Image (cartoon, rainbow, N blue to C red):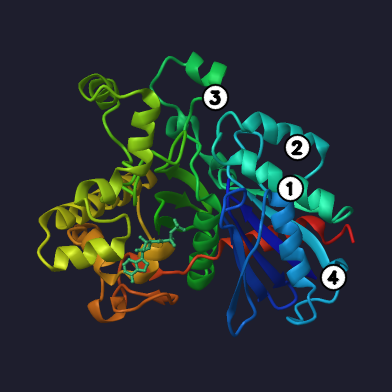
Amino acid sequence: MKIFVINCGSSSLKFQLLDMQTEELITSGLVERIGIEGSCYLINDGQEKHRVFTDLPDHAVALQHVLDALVDPKFGFISSLDEISAVGHRVVHGAEAYASSVLIDDDVMNELEKCTELAPLHNPANIIGIEAIQKLMPGTPNVGVFDTAFHQTMEPAAYIYALPYEMYTKHGVRRYGFHGTSHKYVSERVSAILGRDDLKVVTCHLGNGASVTAIDSGKSVETSMGFTPLEGLVMGTRSGQIDPAIISFLMDKENMTIDELNNMLNKKSGILGVSGVSSDFRDVEAAADEGHERSQLALDVFHRRVKRYIASYAAVMGGLDAIVFTGGLGENSGRSRKLICEGMEFMGVEIDDERNDTRGKEVEISPEGAKVKIYVIPTNEELAIARDTLALTKDLV
Ligand code: ADP
């Protein structure tokens, strides 16, 4: 069974084709600048990446090019689209309607439209991607896999904001959490490695977007992103948690509109905002090494924030068996992992420097016999989406 996985953004899309007999990747690629001048798609044939510049006015045209490339005999990926048994779509927001992945039908499409209000930047692109596939591959089942679904196990004490309760009942203002597919994937991996399903785990997905989740016996009980992905950790360009009173204060002092302020919090803050150098951790680490003080400060603020979440989540769960690092930074920066964990030895958190000198591989980085096991586990959201897609569609064919 071959599963096609797509992740649609407003002007881009990423895709993978997987053979689920072996869970091997057949090909992957991305499309950039959809509807913008200079649009192109890139497809990987295993040896090299082929980039093709062509006019891609919308997602349907972009996907048509990608599907043509998949069946192009020059690449030899598949000989016909009939070989694709189902398509898995990453969908950002499933609100309270979806606690797990779902086979898409008309009712689901209506529900996704309703969720758009909560994720105006993301869900419309996800919906467009599903509609394009429905048009281009009629009869092929589609599955929606939600970033929010895994966190639907949180209790009200974890997800209710201390606002007038009607803000929740009238407008759905509550904590939803994101990156759920990744947190679920790496927590299942750590359970499999340790052979236990009763673990108290904190998973740290640290990339451009970053979040921490507390997982007790396989269930998400707390997560750092909230109503939107803006809450929680310091990120590449997002502020994460701030005092909400800062918003009206700055609107007044800087004479900013709410849109300008939102843009500042989402696009100009985080390690970019503090360092003034870059949103990319590699650049900021390099600048700090050269003595750039604000870069060092940005990293210090980032590491301290992650530490706070790990320790407070251990308290919420009443214990801690394992910490997992994943995402571009979590998988590759031994220095960040070390600085985040430093100072938590009192609660059994300890890093083995030699083991921690690793990048992008699944490995334990705590010392032999450590009380809290610490792992680097590369995430694989596409594989997780493909697995859910297979599980929901295998009896249909
Ligand atoms: P996204 O949220 O866009 O999926 P990723 O998970 O790919 O992001 O993570 C991207 C971040 O990971 C970037 O800031 C990048 O600098 C950082 N990163 C990747 N490799 C390293 C490395 N070797 N050292 C430090 N940071 C790294």
Q: Is 330 located above or below residue 58 in the figure? A: below
Q: Check whether the beta carbons of the residues at disc 1 and disc 2 lie within 8 A of each other.
A: yes
In this rendering, the label closer to the viewer, 1 or 2: 1
Q: Is residue 371 left or right of residue 111?
A: left
Give the residue type that dot 2 points to: Met
State the separation of the CA atoms marked 1 and 2. 9 Å
Q: Is residue 85 visible?
A: yes
Q: Check whether the beta carbons of the residues at disc 1 and disc 3 lie within 8 A of each other.
A: no
Q: Tell me the quadrant of the picture where the C terminus can be found.
A: bottom right
Question: In the figure, residue 383 lies in which quadrant?
Answer: bottom right
Residue 225: horizontal and vertical position, in percent? 42, 41
- Whichever of callouts 1 and 4 sits on the residue coming sooner in the sequence is 4
- Whichever of callouts 1 and 3 sits on the residue coming sooner in the sequence is 1
Number of the label disc, if any, that sits on residue 83 = 4
Q: Secondary structure at mark 1?
A: helix
Circle 2 sits on which residue? 109
- Whichever of callouts 2 and 3 sits on the residue coming sooner in the sequence is 2
State the separation of the CA atoms marked 1 and 3. 25 Å
Q: Is 16 located above or below residue 75 in the figure? A: above
Q: Check whether the beta carbons of the residues at disc 3 and disc 4 lie within 8 A of each other.
A: no
The residue located at (80%, 73%) in the rendering is 71
State the separation of the CA atoms marked 4 and 2. 25 Å
The residue located at (57%, 61%) in the rendering is 381
Circle 1 sits on which residue? 130
Q: Secondary structure at mark 2?
A: helix
Give the residue type that dot 4 points to: Glu
Q: Secondary structure at mark 3?
A: loop
Residue 233: horizontal and vertical position, in percent? 33, 46
